[in-house]
Amino acid sequence: MAIVDLVMPKLGESIMEATILKWLKNVGDPVKMDEAVLEIATDKVDSEVPSTAEGVIREILFQENDVVPIDAVIARIENSEEAPATKEEAKPAKIAATTAEEATESTAEVVSSQLKHEPAKKSHTRFYSPLVLNIAAREGVSLSELEQMPGSGNEGRVTKNDLLQYIAKKKNQPASTTTAALSVSSASPAIAGHSAQTGGNVEIVEMDRMRRLIAEHMVRSVHTSPHVTSFSEADVTNIVQWRDAVKNDFEKREGTKITFMPLFIEAIVKCIKRFPMINSSVDGDRILIKKDINIGMATALPNGNLIVPVIKNADQLNLVGLAKQVNHLAHASRNGKLKADDTQDGTFTLTNVGTFGSLMGTPIINQPQAAIMAVGAIKKRPMVIETPHGDSIAIRHMMYISMSYDHRIIDGSLGATFVTAVAKELENFQPREF
């Protein structure tokens, strides 16, 4: 008999953990290869985890609603195949973590040694997960600060949320008051959990799971990337008139609607090919310039939350292909039919804030990407038209464009140039036949 570990799969570059929603199998249940074992959720998508072996569930290491780090062992499956002899089998088996914040002591000690202000000590009295220690090292939080920090996890352990809240407060407070505030919080953990008074005529609404995850993702993005936003405006009269003229025939012929989104994506893709640095991300001291152009499209859900499905290899699709992908992913998003792969590997994101009547926006970068573009509402305005024969005033369809970008790798000149290039691409749109 061989024991096969079922691990929490990686569901995207920026995803470090997932929440277990429901176990579809119990201990002792038989399971087939690729059969769904449990349902999980991240801040991007809900998904099922398939079995990686055929056999019987012998051990379940996490419970429903537990938050589990990526690559952690979540269950063990016993199958009839003989396990190959390896050196690892000769070693005593280690007991797997049984809560969302646990990991091996050895891993925790290695990561804690990276803390900037104080070396790791095996004698510290509290356990910290590798995720917490990684965040602390990146944000310059010392081990002594961690020791004083109140924890909301099991047995008072410091969770990722505890640490992120502490970092946010620390950045907004003078250094002299941080220690004092921490001491007060340590003495009164019940009070520390509330950031504002709730007296008076106030309705308290608890965040749902997806909203909490989105909130964490947004805070993490702002803490990671120094955001800069550049603006431009585009005369999209040619696009509006062409779409109005062909939309009925397009839908009859292609079996899908033609919206503005695929037209915007087409223009963005053309400009990314000219300015490849926009299609990049940061990895430590390295810049990763992505050769694939995968465009994420922010999509509003019926409950008000937001999800970002990804059009893979958008540069290889014509306008018809883009239109079909946009409509398919939008429909799947709103009906809960997205697959885990549908939200992975995005390299650039587009959000249409004009859908809700907004003229412009300053979007937050979808990590680990380097930039996100927002298009506003299309409005008719009187504009000055310059020609060789003189100037005139005409009613034109105008739209504001904005792009937030990671100032670590994209300078203002490149950011502004790219936004302007997209605007010019839209203005120079050439009507086409279908």
Image: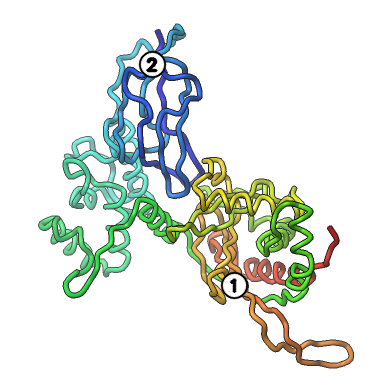
Q: Residue at x 42, y 12 (%)?
A: 79
Q: Quadrant of residue 425?
A: bottom right
Q: Amino acid at mark 1?
A: Gly
In the displayed structure image, the side of residue 9 where residue 372 appears, left or right: right
Residue of label 1: 376
Q: Residue at x 49, y 63 (%)?
A: 364
Residue ID at (76%, 52%)? 254
Extreme residue in the right direction: 389
Image location of residue 368, percent across then percent down? 52, 51
Up the image or down, 365 lies above or below 85; here it is: below
- Residue 10 relative to residue 349: left or right: left
Secondary structure found at label 2: strand
- Name the foreground residue: 26 vs 125: 26
Q: Nearer the viewer, residue 335 or 347?
A: 335
Q: Is residue 81 above or below residue 153?
A: above
Percent position (x, y) of residue 286? 56, 48
Image side of residue 386 versus residue 407, left or right: right
Q: Would you place residue 413 above or below residue 206 in this image? A: below
The residue depicted at 84 percent of the width and 57 percent of the height is 434
Q: Image quarter for residue 248?
A: bottom right
